[in-house]
Each structure stands twice: as structure tokens, then as C-alpha cells.
Amino acid sequence: MVVGNGLIATNMKNYLHDNRFLIFASGVSNSSEVSLSAFDRERSLVEEHLAIANKHNMLFIYFSSCALVDAGHLSIPYYRHKSEIEELINQQADNFIIFRLPQLIGKSENKNTLINYLIDKVKTGEYFELWKNATRYLIEVNDLKIILDAFLDEKSLVNQTIDIANPYRYRVEEIVNIIANFMHKKANYVLVNKKDSYELDLKWFLTVCDKKRLNISFGYEYLYRNLQNIIS
């Protein structure tokens, strides 16, 4: 069972009629969201589907944010909400896995994602502000599907929270320049002396990837290689 209609949900459609799992890929996805009503709607949806998963002995799958590794992000409403949903799942789900995700690389109409936002700015040539000391981890949506297909049957992950990401941590300015080089365009941005950075411990994730023999080529070239899937 899959709940949602966004990028992740669409990519997981082969699980629509699989009663072993309830994959919750709905709710708030914009990290700039501050609406309490939007947060309350997601909380109600999660509670409703937790009850369904528990009743039918389904493994409840939730997608959270890697940024929660940094306690400083809890001052931001979106991340505080994500943390509260994680706690709710820990308290109420019989069986669950929480996958914490970084920025997604994937073709969609959603301009709220970092990669799509930056692609749009480079494409139009519009000036924008860029935080000088900001970094981000990435994962491509088709690779996420490969990972989830392998990880959903991994018993050691049940009732656990795990970070999923390409281990290379990009500076956001680096991301912009990679996109600009790929598009053969000049990015017009102004650097602002602000910081937003955290570091993930991905040893467990990479160990399970090795165990499952997933042949995903991570590293610095990861972004450039995957841009061809979303930039036409």
C-alpha cells in the first residue's frame, strides 16, 4: 500500500497492492512550511494509517529528513514537525522503518525541492542568494527505489531510523556550479555569509548496501551523472 502522489509515491507504485507494507509518502514536503494546519493534517493522516498498518500487520514506512541529525534544525517548524512525527511513529507503530532522506534528485513539477529550484534559477539566469557555508547530501529517486526494494526486507532495520544518502557532502555553491556546467550556462548568484551544514554517519547505510550487493556508484560525480535524468 502506498499513500501519496508525489515523486517518491509515484516511484513506489509497484507496492500499491502489496499488503506487507504501508508506505506513507504524503504530507508536508516543503521545508519552508510554517502552517500549523498543514502539520496537523499530516499528523492526522499518519495516525489514521498507523492504525491501518497495525490492524493488518503491515510494516509502516515513513520518510523523514536527514537534517534531524543536527539539533539546531529543531528551531525550524518543519523539522520540529518531522521530529514529532518520528516520535509518534516510535510510540504507536507495531512495526516500522523511518528512512531519513536528504535532498532528492528527480524530475517533477515541484519547484520547492532544492535541485529543481537551482536548475530553474540557472536556466532563467535570474539572480539569487546563495549561502556561502551551506552543504547538502543528495540521493536520486531511482536509486532510492533500488535501495528501498532491498532494504524493506532487511530485518535489522525494523523499528529503526536510518539515514540514506550519497556519502559525498556537497557545498551548495558546488551544486550550483555543477548544474551550470551541465547546462553550459552561467549561474548568477550572490554569496551570503550564512551557514547551514551537518554531517551524517552513513556507516550503517553503506554496510547494508554492501550486504545487499547494491551497485550504486556514489561520490562527487553522482550529481552530474544524474542531471541527465531531469534536465532535457
Image (cartoon, helix red, strand yellow):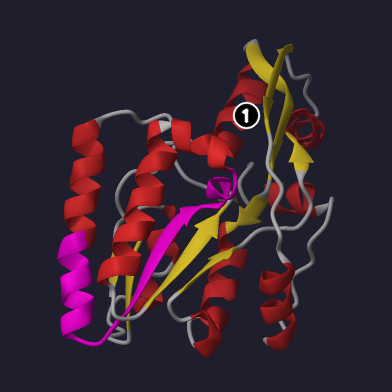
Residue, disc 1:
118
| Amino acid type of the residue tagged 1 in the rendering | Leu
At 35% from the left edge and 58% from the top edge, which residue is drawn?
A: 87
x and y percentages locating residue 121 in the rendered image: 61, 22
Up/down of 77 relative to 203, above or below: above
Q: Residue 217 lies in what quarter of the image?
A: bottom right
Does the segment drawn in magenta span residue 72? no
* Foreground of the two, 182 or 153: 153
Is 64 one of the magenta-colored residues? yes
List x then y, in percent, for residue 92: 25, 70
Q: Is 4 positioned to the left or the right of 111 in the image? A: left
Residue located 58% across and 50% down the image = 69
Residue 12 % position (x, y): 42, 69
**Residue 208, image quadrant:** bottom right
| Residue 204 screen position, x and y as percent | 68, 73
- Residue 125 in sight in this render: no
Q: For this rendering, which residue is in front, 26 or 87? A: 87
Q: Does residue 113 lie above or below 45 as drawn?
A: above
- State which region is magenta: 47-70
Query: From what the image shows, is residue 161 above or below residue 70?
Result: below
In this rendering, position of residue 49 left or right of residue 67: left
Please state the total of marks drawn on the protein image: 1
Query: What residue is drawn where x is 74% and y is 19%?
Result: 187
